[in-house]
Image (tube, rainbow, N blue to C red):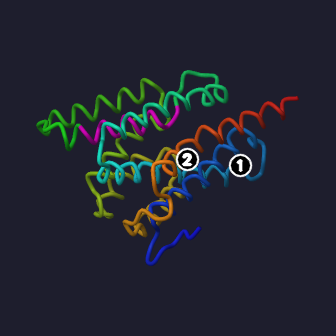
Amino acid sequence: MILIQGKGLSGSALKVIALVSMTLDHIAYYLMDKSIAYDAMRTVGRMAFPIFAFLLVEGYVHTRSVRKYALSLFGFALVSDIPWWLLNHDNTHNVFFTLLLGLWALMAVERLKLTPSAQCFAVGMLAVISTCLHADYEWHGVFLIVFFYLFRNRWALMAMFTVPVMEEYGMLGYIVDLTLLVAYNGERGFITGQYAKYGVYIFYSGHMCVIWLLWLYLQI
């Protein structure tokens, strides 16, 4: 597996970085809250969502069917809420809901041929829904996705608009994220095909199930 192909980072490389980052974050949050490595692992972990948000925008731009894309996100959102609830036992919801609402926001901006004021209203309502659902990253996630889309390849503007959105979640990880995203070379990379794509989705639910089992073991 080659993370760097030619110049820059491929989409597959970014996915691997995000998956590793997310796993470290969840291990720290659920299993290592009293560890000296907790803060460092959470900082690294905060790199994950912005990368997933960026890749969602890339997927939206290049997908052959936005409808199928949305349905797959919705399906995995429902499935992933089972291990999410087992770990959290609250009324929050997993990040697939945030990504789905962000995808709908992109459709409102680009595909529904709405007036600018209607676009802003639609995006705002989707951000409110994300917050009311207590989806991971709430309104921050929806706005981040929209700004990534509006300012694609305009990195100064992207940073100007997204840094305030992500400030609540820690700046160090996000600054590292921006440097990684600038290095994106626009290539898909080594993760190709439907099965590989869904494998990345399945990993999300799978790693939470494993963490839940480890959490149960530690309670014995």
Whether residue 2 appears in magenta in the rendering, the answer is no
Q: Which residue is mark 2?
A: 199
Q: Residue at x 49, y 56 (%)?
A: 174
Position in image of residue 77 (x %, y %): 49, 32
Tag 1 and tag 2, C-beta contact below 8 Å: no
Q: Residue at x 50, y 34 (%)?
A: 76
Q: Which residue is mark 1?
A: 38
Closer to the camera, 4 or 51? Answer: 4
Q: Residue at x 42, y 62 (%)?
A: 188
Position in image of residue 162 (x %, y %): 37, 51
Q: Residue at x 63, y 30 (%)?
A: 83
Closer to the camera, 113 or 197? Answer: 197
Q: Residue furthest bottom?
A: 6
Amino acid type, label 1: Tyr
Q: Local crowd at mark 1 within 10 Å, few (<14), some, or many (≥20)?
A: some
Whether residue 96 appears in magenta in the rendering, the answer is yes
Instruction: Count the numbered circles shown.
Output: 2
- 102 up-or-down from 42: above or below: above
**Left or right relative to 154: residue 99:** right
How far is mark 1 from mark 2, CA to CA?
Answer: 28 Å
Q: Earlier in the sequence, mark 1 or mark 2?
A: 1
Quadrant (top left, top right, bottom left, bottom right) of the C terminus:
top right
- 34 up-or-down from 132: above or below: below
Q: Local crowd at mark 2 within 10 Å, few (<14), some, or many (≥20)?
A: few
Q: Secondary structure at mark 1?
A: helix
State whether the magenta stretch is mostly helix, strand or loop. helix
Amino acid type, label 2: Gly
Query: What's the magenta region?
Result: 94-107
What number is the disc on residue 220? none
